Amino acid sequence: MPNLKSAKKRLRQNETARLRNSARKTRMRSARRSFQEALASGDADATQKAYAAFCSAIDKAAKHGAVARNNASRSKKRAANAMRVLSSAAS
């Protein structure tokens, strides 16, 4: 346990940030799961909506530092490529 007043405050701040980041990551993972389920169903409209929700969630997580920006960019790129494969297979 910290002894200094500033260290105690830092501990409280870190705990709050950890909980906040955890919630953002959970939201992001849920959106990813929904996107993958929509992708597996083959429904283009549902996939498009799920992709938009996933991008929004991951951008918010990256904006606040819960995930790295390059990680967010890479995840969005992979999701976009998966959607492109679905649309080309449907054509």
Image (tube, rainbow, N blue to C red):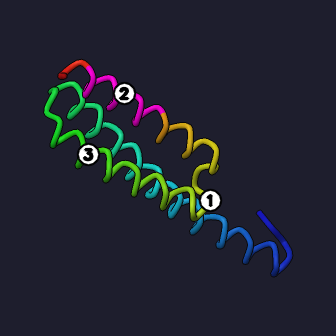
* Mark 1 lies on residue: 65
Q: Quadrant of residue 15?
A: bottom right
* Mark 2 lies on residue: 82
Q: Is residue 33 left or right of residue 56?
A: left
Name which residue type carries label 3.
Answer: Ala
Mark 2 to mark 1 CA distance (whole Å):
26 Å
Residue drawn at x 41%, y 29% as measured from the top left: 81
Mark 2 to mark 3 CA distance (whole Å):
13 Å
Name which residue type carries label 2.
Answer: Ala
Name which residue type carries label 1.
Answer: Gly
- Residue 90 position (above or below residue 56): above
Please tell me whether mark 3 or mark 1 is closer to you in this view. Answer: 3
Please tell me whether mark 2 or mark 3 is closer to you in this view. Answer: 2
Point out the residue furthest to the top here: 89
* Mark 3 lies on residue: 50
Instruction: Pinpoint residue 65: horizontal percent, then vertical percent.
Output: 62, 59
- Judge whether residue 87 is colored magenta: yes
